[in-house]
Amino acid sequence: MLLERAGKRKERAKQILKELSLLERWSRIGEGYVVGAYAYDLMVDCDIDIEVFCDEPNANQVFRMLAEVVDHPQIVDIKYHNYLNESFNGLYFKILYKYDDLEIWKIDMWLFPKSHKGPLSRDLVKDMQYSLTHESRTHILSIKEELSKRDLTYPSIFVYRAVLEDGIINSEQFYDWLADQDIRQWTHWKPARKGEKHSGDQKAN
């Protein structure tokens, strides 16, 4: 059931992306990737994450693109924040898409310079897809669903690390594991492939 629910959420996300033609629109600006839980088949919340890379991020260019969808009847909000001169080093845009009265989708979109040095979800996708199994996906989804029910928010990468690196299998074990973690620190962690050591944490540049 956990995997089935995640699969249904991903199908809904695909439908929204196709309806808004978001990837096609972003492709006029840079090289785009759908990342995060969507890419790992681990969707619990109504969130879609997109990272786009270009030589010189330009907010005006993005606003012209978003103007093409702003009148869509399901889009109820669009937000923007310029983080280019901060540690995130990118432009952030968010769309709220109202699927129905009970389901609001959040679409987080980052436009980064190709020279970006901080941790990126794009760089995690292949290693995550390689490392995940039916069993580990089940454990991760179980923990994420429990966190969602309790309205607790932690960066999902810590759930992935707990399960894939330290063998955590349920939410109670995860809470204990969290006591020794600094979730405020950016992490370059990636799951280790067979025969490799796990990647350590680093401060973002």
Image (cartoon, grey):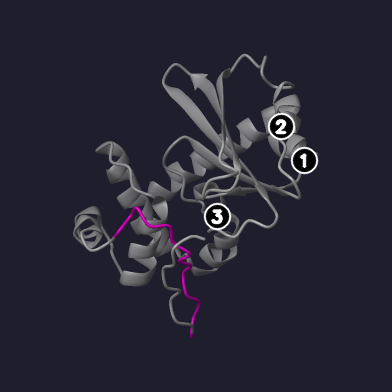
Residue occupying image coordinates x 31% and y 70%: 166
Res 29 label = 1
Q: Are marks 1 and 2 in contact (CB under 8 Å)?
A: yes
Q: Is residue 184 magenta?
A: yes
The one nearer the camera, 92 or 168, is: 92
Look at label 2 and name its amino acid.
Answer: Val
Residue occupying image coordinates x 30% and y 58%: 182
Residue tagged 2: 62
Rate crowding at label 1 as few (under 14), some (14 to 19) or many (20 or more) other CA atoms within 10 Å.
some
Residue occupying image coordinates x 68% and y 28%: 19
The one nearer the camera, 119 or 97, is: 119
Residues drawn in magenta: 182-195
Residue tagged 3: 121
Look at label 1 and name its amino acid.
Answer: Ile
Q: In which quarter of the view is residue 136 placed?
A: bottom left
| Alpha-carbon span between mark 1 and mark 3 | 19 Å
Label 1 sits on a secondary structure element that is loop
The one nearer the camera, 2 or 60, is: 60
Q: Position of residue 181 (x, y in %)?
A: 28, 61
